C-alpha cells in the first residue's frame, strides 16, 4: 500500500521560503546600500579635507590658499559623486588665526557633510533622513619655511 500526503500542505514550503527570503533579504540589501553610501561619503570627506589642507599650505598667500582649498575639496568630493555645500569647509590656523603661513603654524581644515540615506522619501518635513559625516585634517606649515603673507 502507498501512503498519501494530506493535500493541505502540498507546496507550502516553497511559499514560506520565498516569503522569508523576501522579508530578510530586502532589509539586508537596503542596509548594505546604506553602509556603502555612508562609506563613500566618509572617504570623499576625508580625501577632500586632506587635499584642501595640502593646497592651502602650498599656496603663495592666504587668500589664494582659501580659494585653492575650496577648489580641491570640491574636486575630491565630485570624484565620489558628491558636491561641496556652501560654507561647510572650515579653514582655521593655529596658534594665530590670522597668520596661517608662518613658520610653526598648523592649518586645520574641517569638513562635514550630510549623507542622504538611499531610497527614503522625506518623512517628516522637506529633508530626507541623513547621516552626518565629518573630517578634520591638520596640515603643518613647517618650522624652517619662509613666512608668506
Image (tube, rainbow, N blue to C red):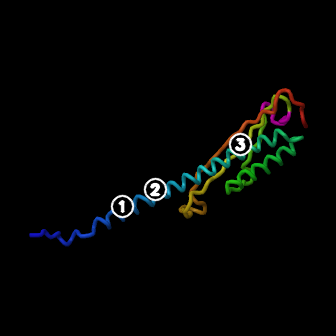
SS for callout 1:
helix
Residues at badges 1 and 3 in contact (C-beta under 8 Å)?
Answer: no
Left-right relation of 134 to 143: left
- Mark nearer the N terminus (2 vs 3): 2
Residue 98 highlighted magenta (yes or no): yes
Q: Is the C terminus in the top left, top right, bottom left or bottom right quadrant?
A: top right
Residues at badges 2 and 3 in contact (C-beta under 8 Å)?
Answer: no
Q: Name the residue nearer the viewer: 89 or 139.
A: 139
Q: Which mark is residue 28?
A: 2
Q: Residues within 10 Å of mark 2 (few under 14, many from 20)?
A: few
- Mark nearer the N terminus (1 vs 2): 1
Count of labels shown? 3
Give the Cα separation between the discs numbered 2 and 3.
Answer: 33 Å
Q: Main secondary structure of the magenta part?
A: loop
User: What's drawn in magenta, residue-wise?
Assistant: 94-101
The residue pinned by badge 3 equals 110
Identity of the residue furthest to the front in this view? 1
Q: Is the N terminus in the top left, top right, bottom left or bottom right quadrant?
A: bottom left
SS for callout 2:
helix
The residue pinned by badge 1 equals 20
Q: Residues within 10 Å of mark 1 (few under 14, many from 20)?
A: few
Picture coordinates of residue 23, whole percent (x, y): 40, 61
Q: Residue at x 78, y 30 (%)?
A: 95
Q: Name the residue nearer the viewer: 105 or 24.
A: 24
Residues at badges 1 and 2 in contact (C-beta under 8 Å)?
Answer: no
Amino acid at each position: 500500500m502507498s501512503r498519501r500526503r494530506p493535500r493541505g500542505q502540498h507546496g507550502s514550503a516553497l511559499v514560506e521560503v520565498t516569503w522569508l527570503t523576501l522579508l530578510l533579504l530586502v532589509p539586508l540589501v537596503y542596509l548594505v546600500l546604506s553602509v556603502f553610501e555612508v562609506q563613500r561619503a566618509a572617504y570623499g570627506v576625508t580625501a577632500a579635507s586632506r587635499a584642501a589642507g595640502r593646497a592651502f599650505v602650498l599656496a603663495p598667500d592666504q587668500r589664494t590658499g582659501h580659494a585653492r582649498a575650496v577648489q580641491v575639496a570640491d574636486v575630491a568630493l565630485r570624484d565620489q559623486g558628491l558636491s561641496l555645500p556652501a560654507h561647510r569647509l572650515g579653514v582655521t590656523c593655529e596658534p594665530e588665526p590670522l597668520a596661517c603661513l608662518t613658520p610653526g603654524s598648523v592649518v586645520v581644515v574641517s569638513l562635514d557633510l550630510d549623507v542622504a540615506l538611499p531610497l527614503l522619501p522625506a518623512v517628516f518635513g522637506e529633508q530626507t533622513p541623513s547621516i552626518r559625516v565629518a573630517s578634520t585634517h591638520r596640515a603643518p606649515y613647517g618650522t624652517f619655511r619662509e613666512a608668506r603673507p
